[in-house]
Amino acid sequence: MAGQDPQSNPYIRYTGIAMQMLVTIGVGVFLGLKLDEWMETKTPWFTIGCSLFFIMAALISLIRSLPKT
Amino acid sequence: MDLITPSLGLIFWQLVFFLLLVFVLGKYAWRPILSSLSEREKSIEDAIELAKNTRNEMAQLKADNDRAKADALIERDAILKQARQTAEKMIATAKNEAAQEAKAEIEKARKAFREEQAAAVSKLKNETAKIAVEIAEKVLRRELSDKNAQEALVNDWLQDAKLN
Amino acid sequence: MSRNRSYKALAISILTLVFSVFSSPATFAQHEHEGHAEATHSHGEAEEFNPGQTILHHVADEHQWHLATIGESHLAIPLPVILYTPTRGVHVYSSKEFYHGSGEHDGFTLHHEHFTSEDGSTVYDFSITKNVASLIISVILLITIFFAVRNGYAKRQGKAPKGIQSAMEPFVIFIRDEVAKNYIGEKHYRRFLPYLLTVFFFIWINNLLGLLPGAANVTGNIAVTLTLAVLTFIIVNFNGRKTYWTHIFAMPGVPKWMLIVMTPVEIVGMMMKPFSLMVRLFANVTAGHIILLSLLSLIFIFKSAALSVIVGPFTVFMTMIELLVAVLQAYIFTVLTASYIGAAVEEHHHDDHH
C-alpha cells in the first residue's frame, strides 16, 4: 500500500515494492526450509508450499500497489 | 549467521534509548521547534498578506488620487470654458449695449438737433413773421395816414380776396 | 560455521580482486592501521591477514571498543558487561576481564562475543557493547543538537534561523511537509511527526557515526533495525482504521471464497512491510561498510603500500557515496514508515481504489 498518494515519489515507491518482494520471497523460502528441517519431512513440501505461497503474496501485493491506470 | 541474529541486549538497549529519545526530543525539542516554525510561517504569511493588502490599498489610493486629479482637471476645463463663454457673452452683451446706447445717443442727438433745428426754424419763422408784421405795421401805419391810400388798400385786399 | 566463514572470506576476496582492477592513496592511514591491527588482534594468528574475518569483525558488535593495535598492545576502551542468569542473577563486570587469556572470568566465558555460563544456564546479555555505547553517544548528540536548535528558536522568536538551527531547519521542514503531510495527510500527520523526525535523525546520525574510523556500526546491526521496524509495525497497526483492517480481512470487491487466500496474503504483506524496512536498512549500511573495508583490505592482501595510491581515491569516492546513502536510507525508512502509517489512518474514500 506504500505510496497510494498520487504525489508520492515514484522512486521511493518502486524501491519499496522491489525490496518488499525480495524480502517476502526470501522469508518464504527461509520459513519453508526451517519448517522442513523442523518437521523432518522427506520431501520438502513446506519449502515448496511456502515459497510458492510467498511468491504469490509478493506478486499480489506488487499488483495491488501498482497504479490503476 | 552472527551478523543476522539480533542480540537480545542490543534490542533491549535500543528500545530503551530510542523510546527515551522519542520522548525527550518529542517533548523538549520537536514540539517547541515545530510550534515556533509554524508560528513563524504564520507571521511571515501574515506579513506577506499585510504587504499585499497595503500594496492594494496604495494602488487603490493612487487610483483614487488619479481619478480625483482627472476629475479636477475636467472640472477646471469646464470652469474655464464656462468662464470664457461668460466673458464672451458679457463682451458681446456689452458691445451690443454699447452699440445700442451709441445708437440711442446718436438718435437723441439727432432728435435734439432736429428739434433745435425745428425750434430755430420756427423761431426764425416767428422772427421773420414778427419782422414782417412790424414792417407791415410800419408800412400800414404810414399808408393809413391818408384816406385815399386806405381805401385803395382795402380795395386791393378785397380784390385779392375776391380773386381768391 | 567455519565453512561459512571461509566462504564469506572467499567471496570478499573475489570482490576485492574485482575492485583492484580499477585500483588507488593513503588518506585513510588511520583505517589502514586499524585494519592491520584488527588482523593481528582478533584471531591471534599474528601475521596472517584474513580480510573476511577482519571485515566481519568490523561490521559486528563487540563487548569492548577496540580502537587500534600497536605492536602487541591493544588500544581498546573497556565497556561494562551486564549479565543476567536465572540462577545467579545480575552481574556487572568490566569487559577488560574477558579480553585476555581464555576469556573466562567469574564463571562466565566470552567466546566470539557470546557469553556462556559455567553452570550451563542461559545467559541474558545486557552489556553496554560497542553498539550500545555508540547508541548512547548518538542519543546524547541528538539531544544536544536539537536542544541547541530549540534554544535557537526560543532566542530568535519569529526571526531568521542561525547556526545549527538553520542547518537543521530544512530537514525538519522537509520531513514535516514532504514526508508527514504528504504521506499521512493534513488531518493526522501531527501525531506522528515526533516519531518520524526522531527516526530520520536517529538513523542519519548513526549512519554518519558508523562511517567514522573506529566507530561502531549501529544502523548496520540487525537488532537495531529490528527494533525500529517493530516500533513502526506497532504504530501502524495500533493506528489502523476500519479501511485498513477491511483491506486485510475483507477486501472489498473480492468474492468471499477468495478471502481464504487473500487474507493470508494480506497478513504476509502486513508483516513483510516492516520486515523489508529492517532488511533494507541493515543490508544497505552493512554492504556499504563491507565495500569500504574490502577496498582497504586490498592493501593488506597484496602487502603493498603502492596499491594505496589507487585504493585511496576509490575509498574516498565510496565514502562519499556512503555519505549520500546515510541520508538516503534515513529518508527511505522515514518515507516508508510514513506511507504505511498513511495507509493505516486513511479513512475510506479509497474503497473504490481496488
Image (tube, coloured by chain):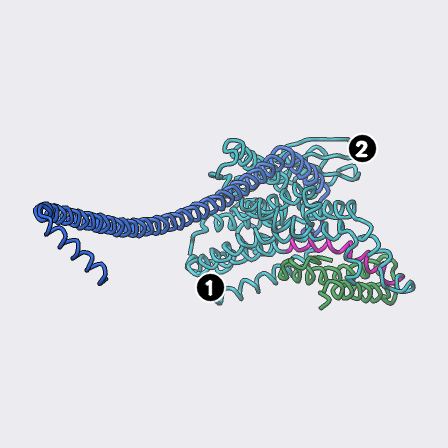
Chain colours: A green, B blue, C cyan
Depth check: B37 or C27 in front? B37
Q: Residue at x 70, y 61 (%)?
A: A17
Q: CA distance from mark 2 to mark 1?
A: 55 Å
- Label 2 Cα neighbours within 10 Å, binned few <14 / some 14-19 / many ≥20: few
- Label 1 Cα neighbours within 10 Å, binned few <14 / some 14-19 / many ≥20: some
User: To which chain does the residue with label 1 belong?
Assistant: C
- Screen quadrant of the N terminus of chain C: bottom right
- Number of callouts: 2
- Indicate which disc, 2 or 1, sits on the residue closer to the N terminus: 1
Residue B162 point in image, percent of width and height: 23, 61
On whether residue C338 falls in the magenta region, the answer is no
Report the span colored magenta.
Answer: C260-283
Q: Amino acid at mark 2?
A: Thr
The image quarter in which residue C246 lies: bottom right
Query: Which dot, 2 or 1, sits closer to the camera?
Result: 1
Q: Amino acid at mark 1?
A: Ser
- The residue identified by callout 2 is C87
Extreme right residue here? C257
Q: Residue at x 53, y 66 (%)?
A: C18
Residue A18 point in image, percent of width and height: 68, 63
User: To which chain does the residue with label 2 belong?
Assistant: C
Residue B40 point in image, percent of width and height: 55, 39
Horizontally, residue C338 falls left or right of residue B81, namely: right
Q: Residue at x 75, y 39 (%)?
A: C123
Whether residue A29 is visible here, answered yes or no, is: no
- The residue identified by callout 1 is C23
